[in-house]
Image (spheres, rainbow, N blue to C red):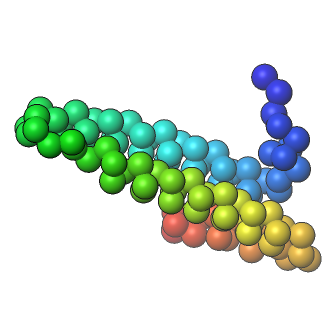
Amino acid sequence: MKVPSVIKKLCLPAKVYLFLSLISIILYLVSMFNAHETIQKADPEEKGLHNYTLGGLGVKVLFTIFWIYVLNYICQFKYGKKIAWFIVLLPFF
């Protein structure tokens, strides 16, 4: 499978953030569909949670694209890669 050239050009911290974000988005989709089914079983007359979570998914995707751009921009500076790694790994500390 070929990796698009846009992804190849990203610095390593941005690629790691992209990978972690993709996992997060997949888990968000799974929980979104599970919550929708649960609400439909509890109250079949309601339309469920689906409409509200699609907006959240859109915001999550836009936020991910924005941070990948920022991380890749930061990597261009002298100590940029160290700063980008710090930003990516900060939530784990």
For image coordinates 33% across by 53% down, the residue present is 52
Q: Is residue 7 left or right of residue 35?
A: right
Residue 56 x, y percent position in the rendering: 42, 56
Frontmost residue, 9 versus 50: 50
Q: Is residue 34 left or right of residue 61?
A: left
Q: Is residue 21 left or right of residue 53?
A: right
Residue 91 x, y percent position in the rendering: 52, 66
For image coordinates 21% across by 42% down, the residue present is 47
Asked if 22 appears above or below 89 in the picture, the reply is: above
Residue 81 x, y percent position in the rendering: 81, 67
Frontmost residue, 69 versus 42: 42
Frontmost residue, 50 versus 22: 50
What is the quadrant of the N terminus in the image? Answer: top right
Asked if 23 appears above or below 86 in the picture, the reply is: above
Q: Quadrant of residue 27?
A: top left
Asked if 49 appears above or below 90 in the picture, the reply is: above
Q: How many marks?
A: 0
Residue 51 x, y percent position in the rendering: 33, 48
Residue at the outermost bottom position: 78
For image coordinates 80% across by 72% down, the residue present is 74
Q: Quadrant of residue 69?
A: bottom right
